[in-house]
Image: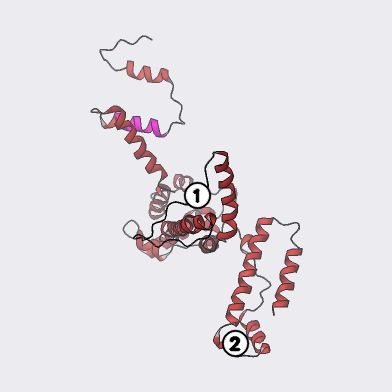
Amino acid sequence: MSHCASNNVSSGVANTSTVDPSLVAEDFNQVRKNIYDIGNYCQSNSVRSLTNEGKISLVENVWKSQPEYKFPSTFSSSSSNHTRSFQMKWLEEFEWVNANDNFKTLYAQVNEIASKLDIKEEIPRVCRLQTARNNVPYSTEEEYYRRAVYVPYLDDFCNSLKERFESHKETVASLQHIFPEFYTKTGFYLSEAAFNFYEEDVSHKEVVQSEFILWKEKWSQEKSENLPKTAISSLEKCDKTFFPNIYILLKLLAVLPVSVATVERSFASLRRLKIYLRNITSERTLNGLSLLSIHSDIKIRVEEVLDKFASVPRNLDFVL
């Protein structure tokens, strides 16, 4: 069995000279994982007692060959179900990063930078009696930093990604089917989690489903290049009178923050303004100054600002 698998893998690698290397690596890792799973299955207690012929027959029945199977890299990005599953698959695969090989490269780069800055490679002082956590066993400086810094950081990073995306992924991902570009291809799909989450904002499920059918009929005769592809463009072309639930869902989807960076940036800008002002400022003025600080890419003409101030009667002497 292993000889046959080796031949299949070798022939697959040999035929990848004209394929993107990143796709080849992804597909090869998937094949290698399947072979690893089969090997573990054959080592289980219930299978170990069988003869070699029995093991081969059992494996052939369980892992039936599927000629129509497509590797993950060949799926279209428009397939949301596959996209979501592969996103979570990426998180699982990321947990199995080979810390040894990757850290060697990273540590060599750090040492190179440290040598240019005259920073000596050394280990922090280690307490004999550690109360917060156990001392990391090590034999070299590289091993110490790999076990004490690199591996814990990877674990924390993976856990943060799961906590951030896993709980709401099904709810948010199903909302994209409201877009005409997706809906005309996949049909009605709104997860139970999405209905439960937005049940106070929309009507009954059957009403929403009927509204989806009318929404699809509206866009069925349009060309694909004319279909709205974003929440904002879909909202602009959605009649609130005929599609009240679709309008609400599109509005909710349009205001969903991609990340908390914008909110954090707003608080940071407001904090800086408060430090500089330190006086009583009206809410309107403070909001305007905050928006100017946040959206610094928007160009403001000085003449327009002066005209605005000059239009209000004040005891100020403007020289224009």
Q: Is residue 24 visible?
A: yes
Name which of mark 1 and mark 2 comes first in the sequence: 2
Amino acid on which disc 1 is placed: Glu
Q: Which mark is residue 218?
A: none
Q: Position of residue 52 (x, y in %)?
A: 67, 88
Residue 43 x/y as whole percent = 59, 82
Residue 124 lies, with reference to residue 310, above or below; the image says below
Classify residue 1 by image quadrant.
bottom right
Q: Is residue 181 magenta?
A: no
Q: Position of residue 108 (x, y in %)?
A: 59, 50
Magenta stretch bounds: 285-294
- Determine which residue is flagged by label 1: 122
| Numbered disc 2: secondary structure | helix
The structure residue drawn at horizontal position 68% and vertical position 60%, both measured from the top left corner, is 24
**Label 1 crowd bin: few (<14), some (14–19), many (20+), radius 10 Å:** few
Residue at the left extreme? Answer: 280
Quarter of the figure that contains the C terminus: top left
Q: Nearer the viewer, residue 267 or 224?
A: 267
Residue 222 in view, yes or no: no
Tell me: 220 left or right of 5.
left
Of tags 1 and 2, which is closer to the observer? 1
Residue for point 66% across, 86% down: 57
**In the displayed structure, does residue 29 sit left or right of residue 253?**
right
The dot on residue 48 is: 2
